[in-house]
Image (tube, helix red, strand yellow):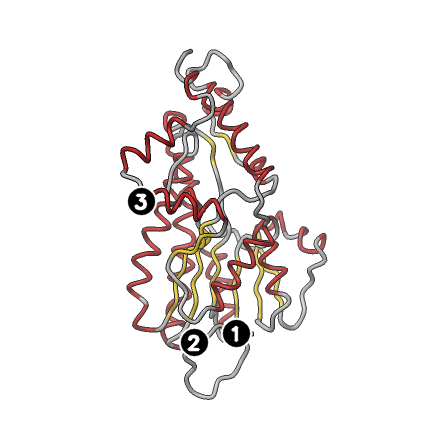
Amino acid sequence: MKPDGNSHGTEQRPEVVLLTGASTGLGLAIARLLLTTDYRVILTARSESMNRFSQAGILENERVWLRPLNITHEAERRQVIAEAAGQWGGVDVLINNAGLAYRAVVEHVNETERRAQLDVNFRAPMELIRLVLPHMRARRAGRILNISSVGGMMAMPTMGIYSASKFALEGMTEALWYEVRPWNIKVSLVQPGFIRSRSFERTRYTDLSEPASRHEDDPYFTHYQHMGRFIARCMERATATPEAVARVVLRTMRRRNPPLRVAGTFDARFFGLLRRWLPRRLYHGLLYRGLPAVKEWGER
Protein backbone atom coordinates (compact mmCIF):
# COMPACT_ATOMS: atom_id res chain seq x y z
CA MET A 1 0.00 0.00 0.00
CA LYS A 2 1.09 3.58 -0.62
CA PRO A 3 0.52 6.88 1.13
CA ASP A 4 -2.20 9.06 -0.31
CA GLY A 5 -0.87 11.91 -2.42
CA ASN A 6 -1.11 13.62 -5.73
CA SER A 7 0.60 11.77 -8.58
CA HIS A 8 1.36 13.50 -11.83
CA GLY A 9 2.01 12.04 -15.25
CA THR A 10 1.90 8.33 -15.84
CA GLU A 11 4.40 7.32 -13.19
CA GLN A 12 3.13 4.32 -11.30
CA ARG A 13 6.32 3.14 -9.64
CA PRO A 14 6.19 1.89 -6.04
CA GLU A 15 6.94 4.66 -3.60
CA VAL A 16 10.33 4.65 -1.91
CA VAL A 17 10.71 4.84 1.89
CA LEU A 18 14.03 5.75 3.52
CA LEU A 19 14.32 4.80 7.21
CA THR A 20 17.31 5.75 9.36
CA GLY A 21 18.40 3.89 12.48
CA ALA A 22 16.66 0.76 11.23
CA SER A 23 18.77 -1.97 12.82
CA THR A 24 17.56 -1.91 16.42
CA GLY A 25 14.74 -0.90 18.75
CA LEU A 26 11.92 1.17 17.31
CA GLY A 27 13.71 1.45 13.97
CA LEU A 28 13.84 -2.33 13.58
CA ALA A 29 10.16 -2.60 14.50
CA ILE A 30 9.29 0.00 11.84
CA ALA A 31 11.49 -1.85 9.34
CA ARG A 32 9.70 -5.14 9.96
CA LEU A 33 6.33 -3.47 9.32
CA LEU A 34 7.56 -1.83 6.13
CA LEU A 35 8.67 -5.22 4.83
CA THR A 36 5.04 -6.39 4.95
CA THR A 37 3.98 -3.61 2.55
CA ASP A 38 4.60 -3.07 -1.16
CA TYR A 39 6.84 -0.01 -0.73
CA ARG A 40 10.40 -0.01 -1.93
CA VAL A 41 12.38 0.30 1.28
CA ILE A 42 15.86 1.60 2.05
CA LEU A 43 16.91 0.53 5.54
CA THR A 44 19.98 2.26 6.92
CA ALA A 45 22.25 1.92 9.93
CA ARG A 46 25.80 2.75 10.87
CA SER A 47 28.40 0.47 9.27
CA GLU A 48 29.18 -1.29 12.55
CA SER A 49 25.49 -2.15 13.00
CA MET A 50 24.79 -3.59 9.55
CA ASN A 51 25.22 -7.19 10.76
CA ARG A 52 22.11 -6.74 12.90
CA PHE A 53 19.94 -6.94 9.79
CA SER A 54 21.02 -10.50 8.99
CA GLN A 55 20.71 -11.41 12.66
CA ALA A 56 17.10 -10.18 12.47
CA GLY A 57 16.51 -12.21 9.29
CA ILE A 58 16.35 -9.14 7.04
CA LEU A 59 18.06 -9.58 3.68
CA GLU A 60 18.19 -7.50 0.52
CA ASN A 61 15.88 -8.26 -2.38
CA GLU A 62 14.43 -6.47 -5.41
CA ARG A 63 12.53 -3.98 -3.25
CA VAL A 64 14.65 -3.82 -0.08
CA TRP A 65 18.04 -2.14 0.16
CA LEU A 66 20.31 -2.28 3.20
CA ARG A 67 22.69 0.65 3.23
CA PRO A 68 25.35 1.82 5.71
CA LEU A 69 24.65 5.39 6.71
CA ASN A 70 26.19 7.49 9.42
CA ILE A 71 23.67 10.30 9.22
CA THR A 72 26.20 12.86 10.48
CA HIS A 73 28.46 12.29 7.43
CA GLU A 74 27.52 14.52 4.51
CA ALA A 75 29.10 12.27 1.87
CA GLU A 76 27.17 9.22 3.08
CA ARG A 77 23.89 11.16 3.17
CA ARG A 78 24.38 12.36 -0.38
CA GLN A 79 25.41 8.93 -1.63
CA VAL A 80 22.27 7.19 -0.34
CA ILE A 81 19.94 9.90 -1.69
CA ALA A 82 21.73 9.95 -5.07
CA GLU A 83 21.52 6.17 -5.38
CA ALA A 84 17.80 6.23 -4.59
CA ALA A 85 17.27 8.95 -7.20
CA GLY A 86 19.33 7.22 -9.86
CA GLN A 87 17.91 3.72 -9.50
CA TRP A 88 14.49 4.11 -7.90
CA GLY A 89 13.48 7.62 -8.90
CA GLY A 90 13.96 9.29 -5.52
CA VAL A 91 12.82 9.14 -1.91
CA ASP A 92 9.08 9.66 -1.48
CA VAL A 93 8.86 9.02 2.27
CA LEU A 94 11.60 9.94 4.75
CA ILE A 95 11.46 8.58 8.30
CA ASN A 96 14.11 10.20 10.50
CA ASN A 97 14.39 7.70 13.32
CA ALA A 98 18.11 7.48 14.17
CA GLY A 99 18.86 9.11 17.49
CA LEU A 100 21.33 9.58 20.31
CA ALA A 101 20.81 10.33 24.00
CA TYR A 102 23.26 11.70 26.55
CA ARG A 103 22.54 11.58 30.28
CA ALA A 104 24.04 14.59 32.00
CA VAL A 105 23.08 17.65 33.96
CA VAL A 106 23.71 20.91 32.13
CA GLU A 107 26.87 21.58 34.16
CA HIS A 108 28.40 18.30 32.98
CA VAL A 109 28.24 18.85 29.21
CA ASN A 110 31.05 20.25 27.10
CA GLU A 111 30.88 21.74 23.62
CA THR A 112 31.97 18.54 21.85
CA GLU A 113 29.18 16.57 23.53
CA ARG A 114 26.62 19.28 22.83
CA ARG A 115 27.55 19.21 19.15
CA ALA A 116 27.40 15.41 19.00
CA GLN A 117 23.90 15.40 20.50
CA LEU A 118 22.60 18.09 18.18
CA ASP A 119 24.32 16.62 15.12
CA VAL A 120 22.48 13.31 15.39
CA ASN A 121 19.06 14.42 16.62
CA PHE A 122 18.69 17.73 14.82
CA ARG A 123 21.27 18.73 12.22
CA ALA A 124 21.49 15.40 10.36
CA PRO A 125 17.70 14.92 10.05
CA MET A 126 17.44 18.49 8.77
CA GLU A 127 20.13 17.82 6.16
CA LEU A 128 18.40 14.64 4.98
CA ILE A 129 15.16 16.61 4.67
CA ARG A 130 16.93 19.23 2.56
CA LEU A 131 18.21 16.49 0.23
CA VAL A 132 14.82 14.83 -0.36
CA LEU A 133 12.70 17.98 -0.72
CA PRO A 134 13.56 18.85 -4.36
CA HIS A 135 12.24 15.48 -5.53
CA MET A 136 9.12 15.79 -3.37
CA ARG A 137 8.41 19.31 -4.59
CA ALA A 138 8.77 18.17 -8.19
CA ARG A 139 6.24 15.41 -7.57
CA ARG A 140 4.04 17.71 -5.48
CA ALA A 141 3.80 14.87 -2.99
CA GLY A 142 5.85 13.37 -0.22
CA ARG A 143 5.97 12.36 3.41
CA ILE A 144 8.42 13.36 6.14
CA LEU A 145 8.12 11.78 9.56
CA ASN A 146 10.48 12.80 12.33
CA ILE A 147 10.61 10.55 15.37
CA SER A 148 10.70 12.90 18.32
CA SER A 149 9.97 12.12 21.96
CA VAL A 150 8.07 13.28 24.99
CA GLY A 151 11.46 14.85 25.66
CA GLY A 152 10.68 17.16 22.75
CA MET A 153 7.79 18.79 24.60
CA MET A 154 8.99 18.52 28.22
CA ALA A 155 12.44 18.25 29.74
CA MET A 156 13.70 15.97 32.50
CA PRO A 157 16.66 16.64 34.80
CA THR A 158 19.86 14.90 33.65
CA MET A 159 18.52 14.79 30.06
CA GLY A 160 18.81 18.48 29.20
CA ILE A 161 20.82 18.34 25.98
CA TYR A 162 18.73 15.43 24.72
CA SER A 163 15.61 17.53 25.19
CA ALA A 164 17.36 20.52 23.62
CA SER A 165 18.01 18.46 20.49
CA LYS A 166 14.41 17.25 20.34
CA PHE A 167 13.03 20.75 21.01
CA ALA A 168 15.15 21.93 18.07
CA LEU A 169 13.85 19.09 15.89
CA GLU A 170 10.27 19.98 16.77
CA GLY A 171 10.74 23.68 16.07
CA MET A 172 12.27 23.01 12.68
CA THR A 173 9.57 20.47 11.82
CA GLU A 174 6.78 22.86 12.76
CA ALA A 175 8.20 25.51 10.44
CA LEU A 176 8.62 22.89 7.70
CA TRP A 177 4.97 21.87 8.07
CA TYR A 178 3.93 25.37 6.95
CA GLU A 179 6.61 25.74 4.29
CA VAL A 180 5.92 22.63 2.22
CA ARG A 181 2.12 22.42 2.41
CA PRO A 182 1.78 24.22 -0.97
CA TRP A 183 3.45 21.17 -2.57
CA ASN A 184 1.21 18.64 -0.77
CA ILE A 185 4.13 17.36 1.31
CA LYS A 186 2.90 15.94 4.61
CA VAL A 187 5.06 16.51 7.69
CA SER A 188 4.58 14.85 11.07
CA LEU A 189 6.30 14.40 14.41
CA VAL A 190 5.73 11.13 16.25
CA GLN A 191 6.29 11.59 19.99
CA PRO A 192 6.77 8.33 21.90
CA GLY A 193 7.02 8.34 25.66
CA PHE A 194 8.38 5.42 27.64
CA ILE A 195 8.72 2.23 25.56
CA ARG A 196 9.24 -1.18 27.14
CA SER A 197 12.81 -1.93 26.10
CA ARG A 198 16.41 -1.92 27.30
CA SER A 199 17.30 1.13 25.26
CA PHE A 200 18.01 3.16 28.42
CA GLU A 201 21.15 1.03 28.75
CA ARG A 202 22.49 2.63 25.55
CA THR A 203 22.18 6.16 26.93
CA ARG A 204 25.63 7.74 26.98
CA TYR A 205 27.25 9.57 29.85
CA THR A 206 29.50 12.55 29.25
CA ASP A 207 33.09 12.88 30.42
CA LEU A 208 31.87 14.62 33.58
CA SER A 209 28.54 12.87 34.19
CA GLU A 210 30.00 9.35 34.16
CA PRO A 211 32.25 9.80 37.22
CA ALA A 212 29.66 12.02 38.92
CA SER A 213 27.09 9.20 38.71
CA ARG A 214 29.46 6.90 40.61
CA HIS A 215 31.01 9.16 43.25
CA GLU A 216 28.84 9.88 46.25
CA ASP A 217 30.67 13.10 47.04
CA ASP A 218 29.62 14.71 43.76
CA PRO A 219 26.91 17.39 44.19
CA TYR A 220 24.82 15.77 41.45
CA PHE A 221 25.26 12.15 42.56
CA THR A 222 21.69 11.87 43.84
CA HIS A 223 20.32 13.40 40.64
CA TYR A 224 21.91 10.64 38.58
CA GLN A 225 21.13 7.81 40.96
CA HIS A 226 17.45 8.56 41.39
CA MET A 227 16.75 9.64 37.81
CA GLY A 228 18.62 6.65 36.39
CA ARG A 229 16.58 4.22 38.47
CA PHE A 230 13.37 6.11 37.73
CA ILE A 231 13.88 6.01 33.95
CA ALA A 232 14.86 2.33 34.05
CA ARG A 233 11.72 1.45 36.03
CA CYS A 234 9.49 3.44 33.71
CA MET A 235 10.87 1.71 30.63
CA GLU A 236 10.78 -1.77 32.17
CA ARG A 237 7.16 -1.29 33.28
CA ALA A 238 5.90 0.58 30.21
CA THR A 239 2.95 -0.97 28.41
CA ALA A 240 3.98 0.42 25.02
CA THR A 241 6.26 -1.76 22.91
CA PRO A 242 8.44 -0.84 19.93
CA GLU A 243 5.98 -2.77 17.75
CA ALA A 244 3.02 -0.73 19.02
CA VAL A 245 4.80 2.57 18.35
CA ALA A 246 5.88 1.30 14.92
CA ARG A 247 2.21 0.76 14.07
CA VAL A 248 1.53 4.39 15.03
CA VAL A 249 4.30 5.49 12.68
CA LEU A 250 2.94 3.42 9.79
CA ARG A 251 -0.63 4.64 10.34
CA THR A 252 0.59 8.23 10.40
CA MET A 253 2.54 7.68 7.20
CA ARG A 254 -0.57 6.38 5.43
CA ARG A 255 -3.07 8.99 6.61
CA ARG A 256 -4.41 11.34 3.97
CA ASN A 257 -4.01 14.36 6.25
CA PRO A 258 -1.82 13.43 9.20
CA PRO A 259 -1.50 15.90 12.09
CA LEU A 260 1.74 17.69 12.79
CA ARG A 261 2.15 16.02 16.19
CA VAL A 262 1.18 12.45 16.96
CA ALA A 263 1.44 10.92 20.43
CA GLY A 264 3.20 7.59 20.14
CA THR A 265 2.22 6.23 23.56
CA PHE A 266 -0.40 6.73 26.27
CA ASP A 267 1.95 8.67 28.55
CA ALA A 268 2.80 11.00 25.67
CA ARG A 269 -0.90 11.81 25.30
CA PHE A 270 -1.25 12.26 29.07
CA PHE A 271 1.71 14.62 29.43
CA GLY A 272 0.61 16.52 26.34
CA LEU A 273 -2.78 17.19 27.89
CA LEU A 274 -1.20 18.04 31.24
CA ARG A 275 1.10 20.57 29.61
CA ARG A 276 -1.72 22.07 27.58
CA TRP A 277 -4.31 22.56 30.31
CA LEU A 278 -2.41 23.24 33.53
CA PRO A 279 -1.09 26.73 34.31
CA ARG A 280 2.67 26.64 33.80
CA ARG A 281 3.52 27.43 37.42
CA LEU A 282 1.32 24.58 38.63
CA TYR A 283 2.56 22.26 35.87
CA HIS A 284 6.24 22.71 36.68
CA GLY A 285 5.64 22.62 40.43
CA LEU A 286 3.70 19.38 40.12
CA LEU A 287 6.40 17.74 38.02
CA TYR A 288 9.15 18.91 40.35
CA ARG A 289 7.41 17.44 43.39
CA GLY A 290 6.99 14.21 41.44
CA LEU A 291 10.71 13.75 40.85
CA PRO A 292 12.10 10.65 42.62
CA ALA A 293 13.40 11.43 46.13
CA VAL A 294 13.78 15.08 45.15
CA LYS A 295 14.07 16.16 48.80
CA GLU A 296 17.46 14.46 48.88
CA TRP A 297 18.79 16.38 45.89
CA GLY A 298 21.38 19.03 46.65
CA GLU A 299 22.07 17.77 50.18
CA ARG A 300 25.68 16.81 49.39
Residue 2 — which label?
1
Residue 282, x across and y down, in percent: 30, 33
Dot placed on the residue nearer the N-terminal end, 3 or 1: 1
Q: Are marks 3 and 2 in contact (CB under 8 Å)?
A: no
Counting residues from the start of the chain, the first of labels 3 and 2 encountered is 2
Number of residues whose C-alpha sits closer than 10 Å to that of mark 2, classed few (under 14), some (14–19) or many (20 or more): some
Instruction: Give the CA distance from mark 3 to mark 1.
Output: 37 Å
Q: Secondary structure at mark 1?
A: loop
The x and y percentages for residue 50 are 64, 52
> Count of labels shown?
3
In the depicted structure, whether residue 222 falls above or below residue 189: above
Q: Residues within 10 Å of mark 3 (few under 14, many from 20)?
A: few
Closer to us: 265 or 147 = 265
For image coordinates 47% across by 18% down, the residue present is: 221
Instruction: Specify the quadrant that holds the N terminus.
Output: bottom right
* Residue 150 x %, y %: 43, 44
Mark 3 sits on what residue?
A: 277
* Amino acid under disc 2: Gly
Q: What secondary structure is marked by label 3? A: helix
Q: CA distance from mark 2 to mark 1?
A: 9 Å
Q: Residue furthest bottom?
A: 10
Going by the numbered disc 1, the residue's amino acid type is Lys
Label 2: which residue?
A: 5
Instruction: Kindly indicate whether the residue at mark 1 contacts the one at mark 2 (C-beta within 8 angstroms).
Output: yes
Residue type indicated by callout 3: Trp
Please give left or right for residue 230 compared with residue 136 in the image.
right
Above or below: residue 18 compared with residue 283: below
